[in-house]
Image (spheres, rainbow, N blue to C red):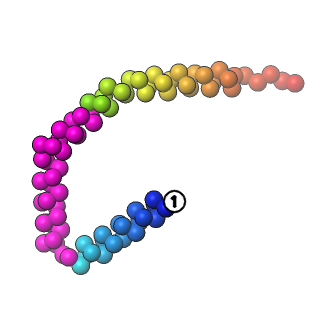
Amino acid sequence: MAGRLIFVAGAAVGYVLGARAGRARYEQIKSASSRVWNSKGVQKQVHTASDFIADRTPDVAEFIGETTKKVVRKAGPKKDA
């Protein structure tokens, strides 16, 4: 709950400061964030994360499938008393 409150407070402060700064400052921030996002270091980490996710997706899908089967087997049809 505290995390949500901090996020909302940060978003509100960012909105107010952004509204006061105007369009020119927005464009400056947008340009800087674009340069950071497109930098070699950041893109290397993005690709590393993408590869990790692609490698792990089948494992996660198998785990979810097996767990679902176990739960369904345990729940099974109920016997009348």
Q: Is residue 28 left or right of residue 5?
A: left
Q: Residue at 46% of width from left, 65% of height from top?
A: 5
Q: Position of residue 12 (x, y in %)?
A: 36, 71
Residue 30 among magenta residues = yes
Of helix, strand and loop, which mostly describes the magenta segment? helix
Amino acid residing under circle 1:
Met
Residue 38 among magenta residues = yes
Q: Is residue 15 above or below residue 55?
A: below
Q: Is residue 40 above or below residue 33?
A: above
Q: Residue at 26% of width from left, 30% of height from top?
A: 51
Q: Is residue 52 left or right of residue 3?
A: left
- State which region is magenta: 21-50
Q: Is residue 14 left or right of residue 67?
A: left
Q: Position of residue 14 (x, y in %)?
A: 30, 69
Q: Residue at 24% of width from left, 34% of height from top?
A: 48
Q: Which residue is mark 1?
A: 1
Could you tell me which secondary element the residue under label 1 belongs to?
loop
